[in-house]
Amino acid sequence: MFDFDYTFHWITVWNVLPEMLDAALITLEVAVLSMILGLVIAIFLSLGKESENELARTSSIVWIEIARNTPALFQIYMAYFGLGAFGIHLSPYVAVLVALTFNNAGYLAETLRGGFSSIPNTQMSASRSLGMSKIQTYWYIILPQVLRKVYHPMTNQMIWAILMTSLGTLVGMLELTGKTDQLQSLSFRTFEFYLVAALMYFIMAKSVLLGSRLLANRLFRGDA
């Protein structure tokens, strides 16, 4: 039933730990880039969903609904395999980045929309009466307040992005999970490799959470 004579060989993992750390950096890189790009797109999607322009509103709604109501794995497959049917061949890295950006943008758009709706309309009127353009009002007055309100949900989304990069292994991306799978297949020390990988994911997630709290204490020190 159970093999209690299992002998751990941690030295096997230790010898290739630098390779796993490099793969973890790729994981962080993809997660951070997908969050930055996703946030930029999400700002336009959240505003577009409330726009009076039918094309902008419809396009935003379609993007958000697809991103939020289909599996992230499906989105990665569409970016990697689906676009290939149209002659667009992306590398595993780019495909995962595109898919996670698409997904993050959809979720962040709804988060931002909640933030925008919490800002009183009188602020726009007051800013316009002072001679500021609509773009200036959004950039200098409204958007900073919105980002402050949605700061913590964005932190959760960042952690989610880090964990979801693991799906990239299914299209051949050698991020942390992909590299771990490759390395353990050479030695068959499955338990040791995946335990160390899980610990690395845990440390990355907790580091983001801790860093977020420290940054929030610094940025929002004067908040009630």
Image (cartoon, helix red, strand yellow):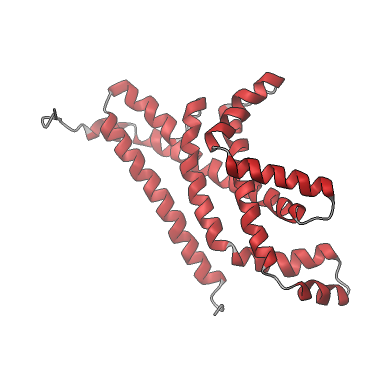
**Residue at the spot x=65%, y=64% of the render?**
115
Residue 49 appears in view: yes
The residue closer to the viewer here, 130 or 61, is 61
* Percent of width and height locating residue 163: 46, 43
Q: Horizontal placement of 102 versus 3: left or right?
A: right
Q: In the displayed structure, would residue 169 be above or below residue 213?
A: above
* Percent of width and height locating residue 189: 26, 28
The N terminus: image quadrant: top left
**Residue at the spot x=60%, y=26% of the render?**
80
Q: In the displayed structure, would residue 169 be above or below residue 206?
A: above
* Percent of width and height locating residue 154: 56, 56
**Count of numbered marks:** 0
**Residue at the spot x=56%, y=47% of the render?**
32
Residue 93 appears in view: no
Q: Residue furthest left?
A: 5
**Residue at the spot x=61%, y=67% of the render?**
148
Which quarter of the picture shows residue 113?
Answer: bottom right
The C terminus: image quadrant: bottom right
* Percent of width and height locating residue 71: 54, 37
Which quarter of the picture shows residue 96?
Answer: top right
Which quarter of the picture shows residue 66?
Answer: top right
